[in-house]
Amino acid sequence: MNRTDQCDDENRAADRVADAFRQLFGGSPDGVWAAPGRVNLIGEHTDYNDGFALPMALPQSTLLAARSRADGRLRLHSAQGDGRITELAVAALAPGTVPGWAGYPAGVVWALAEAGHPVGGADLHFDSTVPTGAGLSSSAALECAVAVAYDELYGLCLPGPALARIAQRAENAFVGVPCGIMDQMASVCCTAGTALHLDARSPERHRHVPFDLRGQGLRLLVIDTRVSHDLGDGAYAALRAGCERAAALLGLPALRDLPEGELARALDALPAELAPLVRHVVTENARVGEAVSRLREGNAAALGPILTEGHASLRDDYRVSCPETDLAVTAALDAGALGARMTGGGFGGSVIALVRAGQESAVGGAVTAAFAAAGHRPPHILATTPSAGARRLEPESRQQPPQL
Ligand code: ADP
Ligand code: MG
């Protein structure tokens, strides 16, 4: 699809959410915004260790038609929700008071107000193409759509990383999920055709690294395994606590501060249960640096082995993979993928596979066949491309006809 086709599609999608908004709330929205899901190329479980990551935005996005309200009410509806409109008072928002999906958008409004920004109510209607719970960050897409819409509706003019921090605070403090900053930074700050080199200690200093998949005869497959093992949340918190304990034992502010050259000595000094966590984080940060260097040299194919090494580290040291993600990686590699790894927090979710153009169906077919043979549900597989971050869309109905 070329850029013009893509813009036309986006504008039509913007029209559809604006129409649905009119039917739900009456009258037109003030605007339509989009915030994408993401895949992380490399740098997993590093953000909460103040480390590095390299995500890219997906074409799949959460669209939000929004209109500000002067009466402090917040009305929320999602095409992927329970069909009802949730109505809340902005002044009464507090952590733990909004159950279910509405907690994510309400949390962003709460976080903005709590940070002292002059925000009020709004009518918000969401419609998303980001699969939920697939490790592709539908939660960050939902939050970041609200953050960029509110930024404009209430004239805040906050820079991208500040909006990402607000969205992360909503998820941490309002919804109660202790995620790092990567997902929200990716959703807000990515640009089309690039990956985002993120330093979680100073998100403001992120860099866009050219990632020209097509120009280099490559494709990136996203394989949604459609499994999500329930131990996810508690295990994530325990891993995070383990990393913090290891950093404290080593006398470091965060594991990011352990140089690779000092890793062997540190591993000897640490309790046996913490050493593999530290090995993963330190080697994973190094893999991000390596991947960025290869991309800057114009050698995206060299990412392949880096992805596969990253998967082994998540499987053997960090222990967040599961039989389904391991199977998808092995089947993709056996079918000729240049590299593959699980992406996202783990315990299910999605796998990415870097393949040469033309190999997509061979690799996808092999993964599907391996899943069938193992008795798993068929995975959802799509070829993806590095896409734009959160932005305002122009519904077709609002565009000016060309001047003759
Ligand atoms: P991920 O971010 O990997 O998709 P999470 O568990 O972090 O998985 O977030 C998924 C949750 O986010 C869903 O269970 C739902 O509560 C909420 N969510 C995401 N997108 C939408 C949407 N478009 N409409 C309603 N809820 C959504
Ligand atoms: Mg999420």
Image: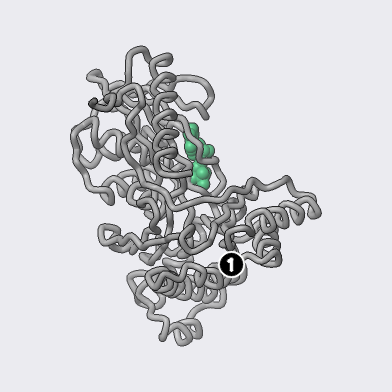
Q: Amino acid at mark 1?
A: Gly
Q: 247 or 72, which is in the foreground?
A: 72
Q: Residue at x 42, y 66 (%)?
A: 244
Q: Residue at x 33, y 70 (%)?
A: 253
Camera-side residue of 317 and 78: 78
Q: Is residue 123 visible?
A: yes
Residue 292: % across, % down: 40, 69
| Image x and y of residue 8, in percent | 41, 33
Q: Residue, x 44% and y 36% (percent of image)?
A: 62
- Image color mode: one colour
In the rendered image, which quarter contains the C terminus?
top left
Residue under label 1: 339
The x, y position of residue 274, in whole percent, is: 52, 73
Helix, strand or loop status at disc 1 = strand
Q: Nearer the viewer, residue 398 or 24?
A: 398
Name the image quarter holding residue 21: top left
From the viewer's perspective, is residue 99 above or below residue 299?
A: above
